[in-house]
Amino acid sequence: IELRFTSSGTLVGASIETYLLEKVRLISQASGERNYHVFYEMLSGMTDEDLDSFLLGEYTAEDFKITSCSGTYDRRDGVKDTDTYEDLVDALEVMGFSSEHRNDVFGIASAVLHMSNLTILPTKGGEECEIDATNEHLEPILRLMGITKENLNQALCYFKIEARGQSYTR
């Protein structure tokens, strides 16, 4: 999104450029590539209070599979994630995101970080699976998303097939 303002700060125009977000980037990166910048920006730019609030206080980018699988943590252009985090927060404010909505965005991104470390265990001889209830990242996910373990387990470990008026869940 490109916004155009007058010298007095009045919005006079905007244009939207199509931008493809590569979903595959969430699960793997090529050597030398990083995941989405927002994850690194949050982990390095948030205050200690915000890190604690979003259940990230004990962690760095090296601690999450989603941000560590390529082994690349710094931007190639030398820009500091701390600086771009401040720009991100400013941009959300300029765009009219309320404090509550900004917290929702950062809460979901924090949950995604923790979900990258979630483990799934096979059950019934490998025919089914379930979330590893002993995984230290499970509780932060549940708190950040406001869901139960049972709901998350159902969403991740089961699927439903409907055909000819009948439904089968497995």
Image (spheres, rainbow, N blue to C red):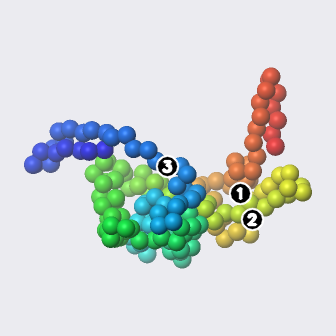
What amino acid is at disc 3?
A: Glu
Which residue has dot 1 on it? 149
Q: Which mark is on residue 22?
A: 3
Q: Which mark is on residue 133?
A: 2
Within 10 Å of disc 1 (Cα), the crowding (few <14, some 14-19, many 20+) is some
What amino acid is at disc 2?
A: Ala
Query: Of all residues shown, which one is farthest toward the left?
Result: 7
Residue 75 pos. (x, y %): 38, 68
Query: Of all residues shown, which one is farthest toward the right?
Result: 125
Q: Earlier in the sequence, mark 1 or mark 3?
A: 3
Residue 158 pos. (x, y %): 76, 46
Query: Quarter holding the C terminus?
Result: top right
Q: Earlier in the sequence, mark 2 or mark 1?
A: 2
Residue 37 location, quadrant? bottom left
Whole-angstrom CA distance, mark 3 to mark 2, is 30 Å
Residue 95 pos. (x, y %): 31, 48
Q: Earlier in the sequence, mark 3 or mark 2?
A: 3
**Which mark is nearer the camera, 1 or 3?**
3
